[in-house]
Amino acid sequence: MKYLLWLLKAAIFFTLFAFALNNQQDATVHLFFGTHWSAPLVLVVLTAFAAGLIVGVLGMVPRWWKHRNAARRAQSGSPATDAPPPDAGLRAAVPSPASSADPLA
């Protein structure tokens, strides 16, 4: 299994390396106010990918902080102010023994 993972990683690396070698021509990115950036196409694609990763991570940071604080509150034992009790959904889903009608009893 370990060799299969290394083979997969090598295949991904060589695919990306071939992509970089095939896209060495210059590309021009026209920005705002008449400015532009000329660079090899592979750098433009890599920069766009990195910018997308950064935007995605920054979009997730508030949710990560919220979950981290909730986990910290759960470990300390203080109840969360905006969350229902953990068994609130179970009380409605499980019928009580008095309400279940047993025809044989």
Image (tube, grey):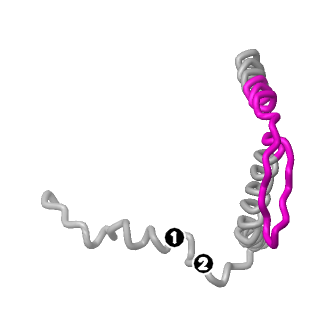
Q: Viewed as shown, does residue 29 lie left or right of 83? A: right
State how far apart marks 1 and 2 are (Cα): 11 Å
Query: In what element is the residue under mark 2?
Result: loop
- Furthest toward the top, the residue is 3
The mark lying in front, picked from 1 and 2, is 2
Q: Is residue 103 above or below residue 5?
A: below
The x, y position of residue 100, in whole percent, is 24, 67
Q: Residue 35 at what x, y percent from top left?
A: 85, 65
Q: How many marks?
A: 2
Q: Which residue does the image show at 77% across and 21% down from the upper left?
A: 10
The amino acid on which the numbered mark 2 sits, given as a three-letter code, is Ala
Tag 1 secondary structure = loop
Q: Which of 75 and 46 is in front in this view?
A: 46
Mark 1 — residue? Answer: 87
Residue holding disc 2: 83
What residue do we see at 82% from left, 42% from top?
A: 26
Residue numbers of the magenta segment: 14-43
Q: Work out whether residue 91 or residue 69 is closer to the camera in this orientation and state it.
A: 69
